[in-house]
C-alpha cells in the first residue's frame, strides 16, 4: 500500500511538472522560434543558436568520452571487481558519478580558465561534460561485457583467435548496445546541465556559431536561466517556457533513443 502510494505520488508529480511545461510552453513553439536567433537577451526572437550550442557541446562530449569509456571498461573487465584494482576502479566510477555538477564547473573554472588561461571555451565545456558522462557510459559498457556468455570467448579462443582479436571480434561487438545506451543516457543528462558550463563555456547573449575551439556558445539551460531572471516580462516568461519545453523534448528524445537502442541492439547481439 505504501509502495503504491509512493509510486502514485512520484508519477503524479512528474506528470504535473511535464504537463505544466507542455501547456505553458507550447504556445511559444513555432518555426520562427526554432530557427530565429534570440534578440533583446531572449525577450524576442528564438532559440536557434541555443539549440545549436547545446547539441554541439554534448555531441563533441560524446565523441570524447566513448573511446575513453571503452578503454576503461576493457581495463575493468580484465581485472573485474573480484580483484583490488577492479574494485577500486568501480568504486571510483561510482564516486565520480556522485560528484555534484557544480563541482565539475568549479574545477573547469580553476584548472582550465584560470590556470591554463583558455578563457570561456565551448570545447572546455565539452571536456567537462565528457568527464561527467564517463561513469554512466563506462558502467553501461562494462555491464554489457560482463553479460556476454563465457562460451563466446571460449569458442573464439578454440578457433585460434588471439586476445586482441577476441576483443575486436567478440567483446566489443557483443557489448555495442551498452556503449550506445550509456552514451545516450549520458547525453540526456549532459544536455540539461547548467552549473558545469555556466562559467567556463557559455555566454548569455551575443554569440552565434563558434569559429574556433576557444569561443563561447549559448545553450538552452543558460538561456532559460537568463529568461527566468526576467520573469516579470510576460514575453520573456513565455520564451522561457518554450525553451524549457524544447529542452525537455531533447532530454526525452535521447532517453527514448537509449531505450530503443538497448532493446534492438541487445536482440541483435544475442542472435
Image (cartoon, rainbow, N blue to C red):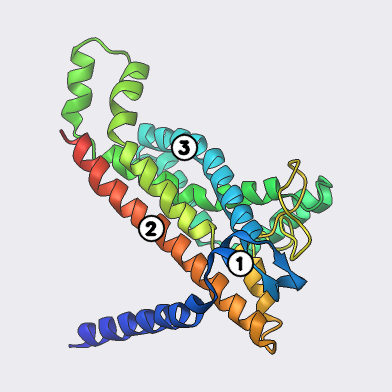
Residue 1 shown left or right of residue 74 in the figure? left
On screen, residue 86 above or below 92? above
The location of residue 125, given as percent across then percent down, is: 66, 51
**Residue 90 appears anywhere in the view:** no
On screen, residue 135 above or below 154? below
Label 2 and label 1: CA atoms lie apart by: 18 Å
**Residue 250 appears anywhere in the view:** yes
The location of residue 4, given as percent across then percent down, is: 21, 84
Q: Secondary structure at mark 2?
A: helix
Q: Secondary structure at mark 1?
A: helix
Q: Nearer the viewer, residue 155 or 125?
A: 125
Quarter holding the N terminus is bottom left
Residue 4 shown left or right of residue 66 in the figure? left
The location of residue 265, given as percent across then percent down, is: 26, 41
Q: Which residue is mark 1?
A: 221
Q: Residue at horizontal 79%, vertical 61%? A: 206
Q: Which residue is mark 2?
A: 255
Label 3 and label 1: CA atoms lie apart by: 30 Å
Q: Nearer the viewer, residue 60 or 5?
A: 60
Q: Residue at horizontal 51%, vertical 78%? A: 27
* Mark seen at residue 72: 3
Amino acid at each position: 500500500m505504501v509502495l503504491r502510494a509512493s509510486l502514485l505520488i512520484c508519477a503524479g508529480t512528474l506528470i504535473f511538472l511535464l504537463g505544466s511545461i507542455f501547456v505553458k510552453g507550447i504556445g511559444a513553439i513555432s518555426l520562427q522560434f526554432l530557427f530565429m536567433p534570440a534578440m533583446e537577451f531572449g525577450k524576442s526572437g528564438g532559440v536557434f543558436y541555443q539549440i545549436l550550442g547545446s547539441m554541439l557541446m554534448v555531441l563533441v562530449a560524446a565523441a570524447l568520452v566513448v573511446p575513453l569509456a571503452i578503454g576503461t571498461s576493457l581495463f575493468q573487465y580484465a581485472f573485474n571487481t573480484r580483484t583490488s584494482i577492479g574494485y577500486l576502479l568501480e568504486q571510483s566510477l561510482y564516486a565520480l558519478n556522485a560528484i555534484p555538477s557544480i563541482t565539475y564547473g568549479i574545477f573547469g573554472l580553476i584548472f582550465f580558465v584560470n590556470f591554463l588561461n583558455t578563457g570561456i571555451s565551448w570545447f572546455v565545456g565539452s571536456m567537462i561534460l565528457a568527464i561527467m558522462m564517463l561513469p554512466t557510459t563506462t558502467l553501461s559498457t562494462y555491464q554489457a561485457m560482463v553479460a556476454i556468455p563465457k562460451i563466446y570467448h571460449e569458442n573464439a579462443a578454440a578457433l585460434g583467435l588471439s586476445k586482441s582479436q577476441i576483443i575486436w571480434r567478440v567483446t566489443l561487438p557483443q557489448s555495442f548496445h551498452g556503449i550506445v545506451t550509456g552514451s545516450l543516457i549520458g547525453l540526456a543528462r549532459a544536455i540539461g546541465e547548467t552549473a558545469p558550463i555556466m562559467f567556463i563555456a557559455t555566454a548569455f547573449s551575443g554569440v552565434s556559431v563558434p569559429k574556433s575551439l576557444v569561443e563561447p556558445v549559448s545553450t538552452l539551460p543558460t538561456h532559460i536561466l537568463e529568461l527566468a531572471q526576467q520573469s516579470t516580462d510576460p514575453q520573456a516568461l513565455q520564451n522561457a517556457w518554450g525553451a524549457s519545453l524544447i529542452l525537455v523534448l531533447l532530454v526525452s528524445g535521447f532517453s527514448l533513443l537509449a531505450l530503443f537502442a538497448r532493446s534492438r541492439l541487445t536482440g541483435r547481439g544475442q542472435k
